[in-house]
Amino acid sequence: MDLGPWHVVLMVGAGVITAVPLLCFTASAIRVPLSTIGLLQYIAPVLQFLCGVLIAKETMPPSRWIGFSIVWLALAIFTYDSLRAARAARIGRSARTLDHVVT
């Protein structure tokens, strides 16, 4: 079955269209902490969830709401702990800087 040259052009173009955003994501992920990248990975599933519930009017049994709540509770705890650790590290660096100035 011969589909012609346009088929080849479309296949190559589809590869490029797929690869460019992935390369941009890789280039930006190098500049961002991995914990931030991990949290950003939740954006697409949450948007899909919201589209399903709000736009498609998908029914949500209590078990799904419980699972969704557990995941977001865990993310909130992780974020709180990360912010607390970053603040403690910043305070520790400030204290060490002041010790060097005083001595």
Image (cartoon, rainbow, N blue to C red):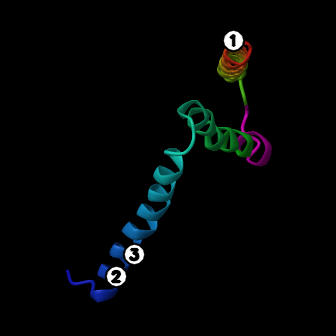
Q: Kindly identify the amino acid type of the residue bearing the numbered disc 2.
A: Val
Q: In this view, does 74 lie to the left or right of 6?
A: right
Q: Residues within 10 Å of mark 1 (few under 14, many from 20)?
A: few
Q: In this view, does 36 lie above or below 103?
A: below
State the residue at coordinates (49%, 45%). Answer: 30
Q: Kindly identify the amino acid type of the residue bearing the numbered disc 3.
A: Gly
The reply to whether the C-beta atoms of the residues labelled 2 and 3 are less than 8 Å apart is yes
Q: Is residue 63 above or below residue 18?
A: above
Residue 13, given in percent of the width and then of the height, sits at: 39, 75
- Quadrant for residue 54, please give it: top right
| Residue at the farthest right position | 54
Q: Which of marks 3 and 1 is nearer the N terminus?
A: 3
- Quadrant for residue 77, please give it: top right
Rendered image: mark on residue 103: 1
Q: Is residue 25 left or right of residue 83?
A: left
Q: What element carries label 1?
A: loop
The residue beneath circle 3 is: 13
Viewer-side residue, 62 vs 71: 71
What is the span of residues highlighted in magenta in the rendered image? 52-59
Image quarter in which the C terminus is found: top right
Image quarter in which the N terminus is found: bottom left
Q: Residues within 10 Å of mark 3 (few under 14, many from 20)?
A: few
Rendered image: mark on residue 68: none
The residue beneath circle 2 is: 9
Q: How crowded is mark 2: few (under 14 residues within 10 Å), some or many (20 or more)?
A: few
Q: Is mark 3 on a helix, strand or loop?
A: helix
State the residue at coordinates (72%, 22%). Answer: 65
Q: Is residue 36 above or below residue 30?
A: above
Residue 9, given in percent of the width and then of the height, sits at: 34, 82
Q: In this view, does 26 lie above or below 61?
A: below
State the residue at coordinates (65%, 21%). Answer: 71
Q: Which of marks 1 and 2 is nearer the N terminus?
A: 2
